[in-house]
Image (cartoon, rainbow, N blue to C red):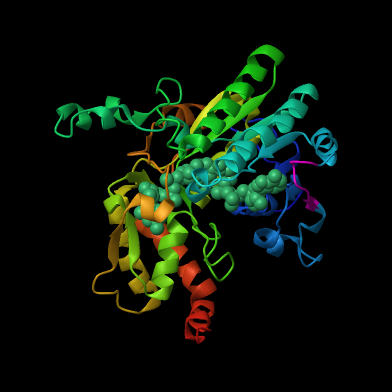
Amino acid sequence: MAASTVRINLDGKPINPLTILMIGAGGFIGSHLCEKILQETPHKILALDVYSDKIKHLLEPDSLEWAGRIQFHRINIKHDSRLEGLIKMSDLTINLAAICTPADYNTRPLDTIYSNFIDALPVVKYCSENGKRLIHFSTCEVYGKTIGSFLPKDSPLRQDPAYYVLKEDTSPCIFGSIEKQRWSYACAKQLIERLIYAEGAENGLEFTIVRPFNWIGPRMDFIPGIDGPSEGVPRVLACFSNALLRREQLKLVDGGESQRTFVYIKDAIEAVLLMIENPDRANGHIFNVGNPNNEVTVRQLAEMMTAVYANVSGEPALEEPTVDVSSKEFYGEGYDDSDKRIPDMTIINKQLGWNPKTSLWDLLDSTLTYQHKTYAEAVKKVISKPTTS
Ligand SMILES: NC(=O)c1ccc[n+]([C@@H]2O[C@H](COP(=O)([O-])OP(=O)(O)OC[C@H]3O[C@@H](n4cnc5c(N)ncnc54)[C@H](O)[C@@H]3O)[C@@H](O)[C@H]2O)c1
Ligand SMILES: O=c1ccn([C@@H]2O[C@H](COP(=O)(O)OP(=O)(O)O[C@H]3OC[C@@H](O)[C@H](O)[C@H]3O)[C@@H](O)[C@H]2O)c(=O)[nH]1
């Protein structure tokens, strides 16, 4: 975008160029947000992460048109005295850093809690003390299970949205027992939300909290044995992509009955840009960001991904594309699940006029096209290598 174009916000006011500190800029969401900001706005980004692979295309070569507007800082926020200085230099801090893969919640609960609560504390504190605005990434997992999941299976109330649609300002947060360590993540996220909210109420911190509902798209997580550990278990999109690329069966945890709504990353990033550029409408709010129209069971997701991938790759699907596995076998002791996640969109609609656009089929089509182009050759090479005994 031409730096001279004046951008106007939702209230018709000109948007001044900002310096944005993006913590976790090298991750899935961060990489898309950096791309969007550099391509469509005049804002500057201080991109902070321990990894930069997913934003390498934005950092190199130096001749890129936005070269002067992004600066990478390889920093671990757990222990780095440069954090406060970077927050002071910026108009806005966006915190995306977190351990956020379910396979870690019950197997590395301490790391999960430290990452999602303790490590976020200095970020909140420095923003509050220095009068800087904060956009913090929480999660839809703070809602936990729906009220409806506790009703008898045949109860007609299960069909009533009041028992399952998740609302920022009224829905309760329902987690399992302490032994179900899956909830370590949701609980840590909930406590940091409460702390941010309290900083706003008592010390005037200008904040926005984002609750993403299963954002998916290119560059999400990793393909085990290709650009991540062979034994690693990423989130469902990458697990299923990996199986499709290897022509293996897709594993359905506990029958794949849980339901999710999936939103295309590019739609969701538009919502974040609206928050960035409309502080008067976004400050003090918690926003669900998801696509209520894209609900499926995990089994339906597997079936749809199998069909889309057959189109994209030109290879017919396996005769039996899925296999059931127990959650204990797949994730280990202490796993539990969210049953159903439909975001209420009233608040984000009212404040920012945002709506998701992309259907599940279309978003899977573009995402699996990317997965195929990026990984198919590398996976074939790995599979064709003789295994050492
Ligand atoms: N993708 C989703 O659908 C989704 C859903 C709910 C919530 N979220 C939240 O959104 C945020 C971003 O998610 P994502 O999907 O992009 O995950 P991601 O794992 O791809 O990105 C997180 C990034 O943070 C970095 N990071 C972690 N700890 C760090 C530290 N101590 N210092 C510096 N960098 C650190 C990681 O290296 C990684 O690049 C997270 O807070 C996550 O909980 C995402
Ligand atoms: O191979 C797999 C992987 C996952 N699954 C199931 O697919 C569903 C979705 O799993 P994901 O790995 O995408 O993660 P979840 O939706 O449970 O949680 C996510 O929600 C929002 C964010 O906070 C995090 O990114 C993550 O916690 C779960 O029911 C899981 O059990 C499978 O059936 N098979």
Q: Is residue 75 magenta?
A: yes
Comparing 154 with 112, the one in front is 112
Q: Which residues are magenta?
A: 69-79
**Extreme-top residue of the structure:** 202
Q: Is residue 42 magenta?
A: no
Classify residue 240 as left or right of residue 158.
Answer: right
Residue 243: x %, y % from top left:
40, 68
Q: Residue at x 59, y 39 (%)?
A: 110
Comparing 16 with 145, the one in front is 145
Would you say residue 270 is visible in this rendering?
no
Would you say residue 321 is visible in this rendering?
yes
Q: Residue at x 64, y 26 (%)?
A: 207
Residue 352: x %, y % from top left:
52, 32
Q: Residue 129: which quarter of the image? A: top right
Residue 386: x %, y % from top left:
50, 87
Residue 50: x %, y % from top left:
72, 53
Q: Residue 336: which quarter of the image? A: top left
